[in-house]
Image (spheres, grey):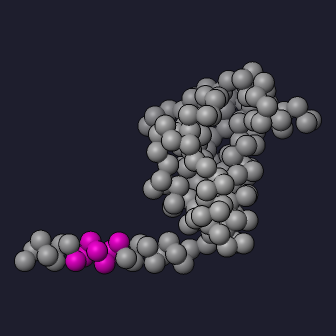
Amino acid sequence: MQKCIVVAVLALAMIACHRQAESADPETRIVAYLQQHVTPGQPVLVTDLYNNVFTTPEDRQALQRMYDAFFKIPAFCVDYSMKNGKPPTLKQISDQFQLKVPSEVEVLFRTMEADPRMPRFIERDRSTGEITRIDADRIAADEKFGKPLRNR
């Protein structure tokens, strides 16, 4: 009997979380989706997200904004580090790119780290997630990620 009650409560909680995620703003829905679906060693295909998962204009706009930030974050980290002598904090990155979902910058870094196509530009502290090392030369030399550094 107790097991049935526990299962019923868990099922209701899952339904409530699903409904809450559905009613959340697009950026929150995308972050929640990525938190559940980013798998180490597996690329995140934005075209799949765009064409099959987040298909409303609002979703696509939020996805595009996150995609743009994704490609600008490494160069920002280099600029910040060169100007300040230390890497930016996750909060500073979040503020710079106006990422409004609390775990959004963490999800973007997890996506970078999970994708085998992504060069290893940045090392982070395993317990805090904060940046411990930036490979500025590698970022600057990269065709996509170094572009903001070359366009000054």
Q: Quadrant of the C terminus?
A: top right
> Quadrant of residue 9 in the image?
bottom left
User: In the drawing, does residue 105 fall left or right of residue 129?
Assistant: right
The residue positioned 22% from the left and 77% from the top of the image is: 8
> Does residue 73 appear in this view?
yes
How many marks on residues? 0
Which residue is rendered at x = 51% and y = 61% of the image?
32
- Residue 64 appears at what percent x and percent y? 73, 58
Q: Could one spot residue 80 in this view of the protein?
A: no
Magenta span of residues: 8-14
115 w.r.t. 60: above or below? above
Residue reaching furthest to the top: 137
Secondary structure that dominates the magenta span? helix
Using residue 7 as the reference point, say whether residue 32 is left or right of it: right
Residue 149 lies, in percent from the top left, at: 84, 33
Residue at the image position 14 percent from the left and 76 percent from the top: 4
Q: In this view, which residue lies farthest toward the right? A: 152
Q: Position of residue 82 (x, y in %)?
A: 77, 27
Which corner quadrant holds the N terminus? bottom left
* Left/right of residue 80 with respect to residue 15 in the rendered view: right
Give the residue displayed 44% in from the left and 37% down from the top.
Answer: 127
Indicate whether 31 appears above or below 42: below
Q: Nearer the viewer, residue 123 or 116?
A: 116
Q: Is residue 46 magenta?
A: no
**Quadrant housing residue 14:** bottom left
In the rendering, at what x and y percent does residue 52 appear?
A: 60, 64
Left/right placement of residue 45 relative to residue 4 reads right
